[in-house]
Image (cartoon, grey):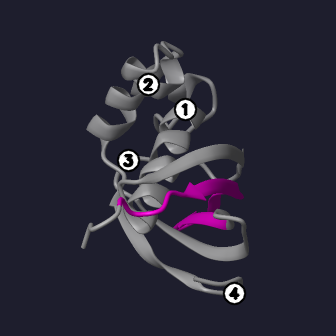
Amino acid sequence: MKAGDELPPLTIPITRTLIVAGAVASRDYQDVHHDTELAKEKGSPDIFMNILTTNGLVGRYITDCFGERAVIRKVAIRLGAPNYPGDTMVLSGTVTSVEGGIAGVRVVGANSIGDHVTGSVTVSLAPSPEGAV
């Protein structure tokens, strides 16, 4: 692995259940994440995903790409276009640095209206145990 390497994309269907379950799991009870009518009253076309769910999905993407021994050290993300039910988000990543067993990765999650999330992740690349295949 070296700087410039592209990670394989991860496609995530944005379902109503994913949005609501993520909000509840992260104890984010803001109505815009679970109540369509109240979200519309506040100017949104529908409920939308919260940042904590997005953060979890970014973490999942990195650990899926780097393997079970990888340890996420830092996540710095910024939200953009909302994730609404019925859309799809595609996460992609580019390795920006590799030094001393630590990799930096630029991550983008795009949906049909733009970039939902952009940011960077720092991950430790733990060595395999001796004798592991």
State the mark number for residue 23.
2
Secondary structure, mark 4, is loop
- Place of residue 113 in the rendered image (x, y in percent of width and height, measured from the top left): 59, 65
Q: Amino acid at mark 3?
A: Pro
Instruction: Say whether disc 2 or disc 3 marks the residue closer to the N-terminus.
Output: 2
Circle 1 Cα neighbour tier, 10 Å, few/some/many (<14 / 14–19 / ≥20):
some
State the mark number for residue 4.
4
Q: Amino acid at mark 2?
A: Ala
The residue depicted at 37 percent of the width and 21 percent of the height is 25
Distance of label 2 from label 4 (alpha carbons): 34 Å
Q: Amino acid at mark 1?
A: Leu
Range of residues picked out in magenta: 106-129
User: Split into 4 quadrants, where in the image is the N terminus?
Assistant: bottom right
17 is higher (above) or lower (below) than 13: above
Instruction: Say whether disc 1 or disc 4 marks the residue closer to the N-terminus.
Output: 4
Q: Amino acid at mark 4?
A: Gly
Distance of label 2 from label 1 (alpha carbons): 8 Å
Q: Are marks 2 and 1 in contact (CB under 8 Å)?
A: yes
Secondary structure, mark 3, is loop
The residue depicted at 45 percent of the width and 59 percent of the height is 61
**Nearer to us in this view, 70 or 6:** 70
